[in-house]
Amino acid sequence: MAALTLSIFSLLVSTTIAIEDFQNTQFTYKEEWCPFQALPLQLNADRKQFYFHVYFHEIFTGPNSTTTAAANPNSDFPNFGEVLIMDVPLWGHLNGTNVIARLQGVATQSDQKTFGWHLSFNIEFELPALKGSTLMGMGRALQLTTPREFAIVGGTGVFSLATGQMYGRKLSSLDENELWIEFKIVGYYTPMKKPDW
């Protein structure tokens, strides 16, 4: 029994990878693709962990606006049915010196009783080692509540088969036309064989 427990534990152990480690990440696959192939489950033996600590800076008005209303129907409850489109930079520091990624997606005011927003978004990375890789997130944000929590529901590029959580907390903003949120992103991905074309 102890040997079985140790074996299962060793299969589930994940390797934590820092941002710098992605510079040297390479995957080599030699097997050929078939039109259809069913393989035994590998119990996450190749699963790897990732972590990001970034700052979300949303601007609602002016020439540098990151969020704009795509639909604003007339309703009894303020903002119910409103749809916002977002393209928000994620910074590595609060002083905004380096963009790690961009959060792009849709926020919908879907609650008739309070200011509850449903968010669906992609995080597209701009770091050279992660260029073209994305994480997909989804969840609910209450406008006046902190912290916020979103599920990682997928990924592409380096982050294939990604799962995990994103945690956000509102920071103080200088005026009502902008919003700073501290974001901690933690999850897992599994390197996958990709087609040669």
Image (cartoon, rainbow, N blue to C red):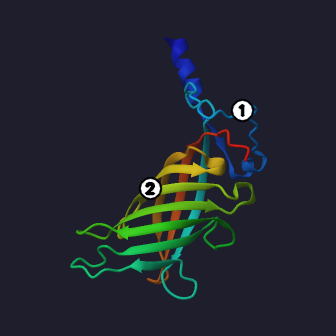
Residue 101: image quadrant is bottom right
Tell me the kind of residue under disc 1. Answer: Glu
Q: Which residue is labeled 1 in the image?
A: 32
Image position of 108 with respect to 165: above or below: below
Where residue 6 appears, as percent x and y from the top left, is 56, 19
Where residue 84 appears, as percent x and y from the top left, is 43, 74
Where residue 102 appears, as percent x and y from the top left, is 60, 66
> Residue placed farthest to the front in the image?
35
Tell me which residue sits at (23%, 77%) in the image. Answer: 77
Number of marks in the rendered image:
2
Label annotation for residue 150: 2
Where residue 131 appears, as percent x and y from the top left, is 70, 59
The local secondary structure at tag 1 comes to loop
How crowded pointer 1 is (Cα within 10 Å; few <14, some 14-19, many 20+) is rated as few
The residues bearing labels 2 and 1 have C-alpha atoms spaced at a distance of: 37 Å
Residue 31 relative to residue 152: left or right: right
Tell me which residue sits at (24%, 69%) in the image. Answer: 112
The local secondary structure at tag 2 comes to strand
State which mark lies toward you, 2 or 1: 1
Image position of 3 with respect to 159: above or below: above
Tell me which residue sits at (52%, 13%) in the image. Answer: 2
Residue 15 relative to residue 65: left or right: right
> Residue placed farthest to the right in the image?
24
- Mark 2 vs 1, N-terminal side: 1
How crowded pointer 2 is (Cα within 10 Å; few <14, some 14-19, many 20+) is rated as some
Closer-to-camera residue (165/196): 196
